[in-house]
Amino acid sequence: MSLRLEWSNEQDKVEIPESFFGQLEQLLQLAGAAEGLVDGEVMLSFVNDEEIHQLNKEYRNIDRPTDVLSFAMQEESDEELDIVYEVENEDELLPFEGILGDIIISTERAKLQSEEYGHSLERELGFLFVHGFLHLIGYDHQDEASEAIMTEKQEAVLRQAGLNR
């Protein structure tokens, strides 16, 4: 088993090069390795602002589009999610496998943000993907300390993949 990425491009407003999906696979492997995660599946959907607005309103009661939404499987059931984590200095694996969850990214928001920040669309999409992945495995940014941790983890993965600002 390994970390796997399933994706769909459900929008037609922003062109995403087919070659970029290989980079998303790389980002998943790098982010997973950084967390000791060796197994699981992530579902990624690229959508337009209208679709993510609808999802944001329905699931978060926020009536506007956003850039990325993450829906972790462990949040949707009372059952434990089986994920395989590599344990440092031990030969055993902790259970955690199966579908980690869904990441939904608005390509329209990503394009606008890449222009605002002055970096490539690929870098912004990569950032949003890694950000969403970290949410799937339990990270959050409710306060300054947790936001700093997430930011460092995201930037480390993006640097490894060559997606610098």
Image (spheres, rainbow, N blue to C red):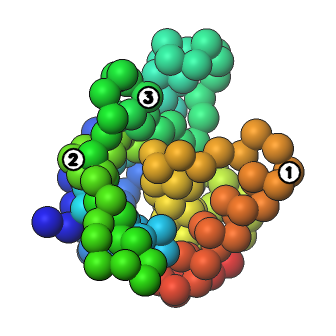
Q: Position of residue 15 (x, y in %)?
A: 37, 57
Q: Secondary structure at mark 3?
A: helix
Q: Position of residue 125 (x, y in %)?
A: 49, 60
Q: Is residue 122 visible?
A: no
Alpha-carbon distance for marks 3 and 2?
A: 14 Å
Residue topped by disc 3:
75
Relative depth, front residue between 97 and 129: 97
> Marks 3 and 1: in contact by CB < 8 Å?
no
Residue occupying the point 53% across, 46% down: 138
The C terminus: image quadrant: bottom right
Q: Position of residue 47 (x, y in %)?
A: 39, 38
Q: Amino acid at mark 2?
A: Gly
Q: Secondary structure at mark 1?
A: helix
Question: From this viewpoint, which residue is outermost toward the left?
Answer: 1
Relative to 85, residue 106 above or below? above
The N terminus: image quadrant: bottom left
Q: Amino acid at mark 3?
A: Glu
Q: Position of residue 114 (x, y in %)?
A: 63, 61
Residue topped by disc 1:
144
Residue 57 figure quarter: top right
Residue 12 figure quarter: top left
Residue occupying the point 46% across, 22% down: 55
N-terminal label among 3 and 2? 3
Residue topped by disc 2:
98
Residue occupying the point 82% across, 55% down: 145
Q: Residues within 10 Å of mark 1 (few under 14, many from 20)?
A: few
> Marks 1 and 2: in contact by CB < 8 Å?
no
Q: Secondary structure at mark 2?
A: loop
Q: Amino acid at mark 1?
A: Glu
N-terminal label among 2 and 1? 2
